[in-house]
Amino acid sequence: MSANKSPFDFVKRNGIAMLVGMFVCGLVGYFTAGADGRALGTGIGVILGLIASGLAAKVRGSKL
């Protein structure tokens, strides 16, 4: 059997951590950007939070 798992299985296992990362980084981006760039700051924060939490889950999963 193949050791590769589907991306959907990865999201099912780590979905909560990814949502929390998106939420926290989105809030940081919202309050950091200021009045003129809140939408852009929130979007960038959400994207960075998703990437960071996905990478953390990947590293955490490989050590188990």
Image (spheres, rainbow, N blue to C red):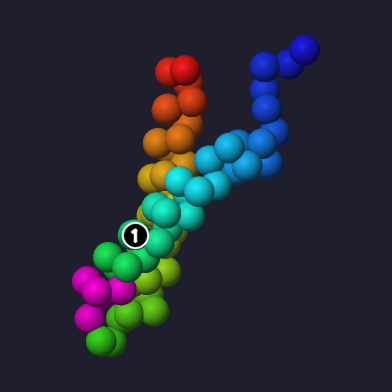
Relative image position of residue 54 (x, y in whole percent): 47, 42
| Residue in the picture at 40% in, 36% down | 56
In the displayed orientation, state which residue is furthest to the top: 1
Q: Quadrant of residue 29?
A: bottom left
Horizontally, residue 27 falls left or right of residue 19, namely: left
What secondary structure is the stretch in magenta mostly built from?
A: helix
| Quadrant including the N terminus | top right
Q: Nearer the viewer, residue 50 or 37?
A: 50
How many numbered discs?
1
Name the kind of residue labelled 1 in the image.
Val
Left or right: residue 60 compared with residue 9: left
Is there any visible trace of residue 7 in the rendered image?
A: no
Q: Is residue 37 magenta?
A: no
| Residue farthest front in this picture | 16
Where's residue 8, x and y in %? 68, 41
Residue range (magenta): 30-34
Q: Position of residue 33 (x, y in %)?
A: 25, 75
- The residue sitting at 47% across, 17% down in the picture is 64
Residue located farthest toward the bottom when viewing the structure as drawn: 36
Displayed quadrant of residue 13: top right
Q: Which residue is mark 1?
A: 24
Say above or below: 33 vs 62: below
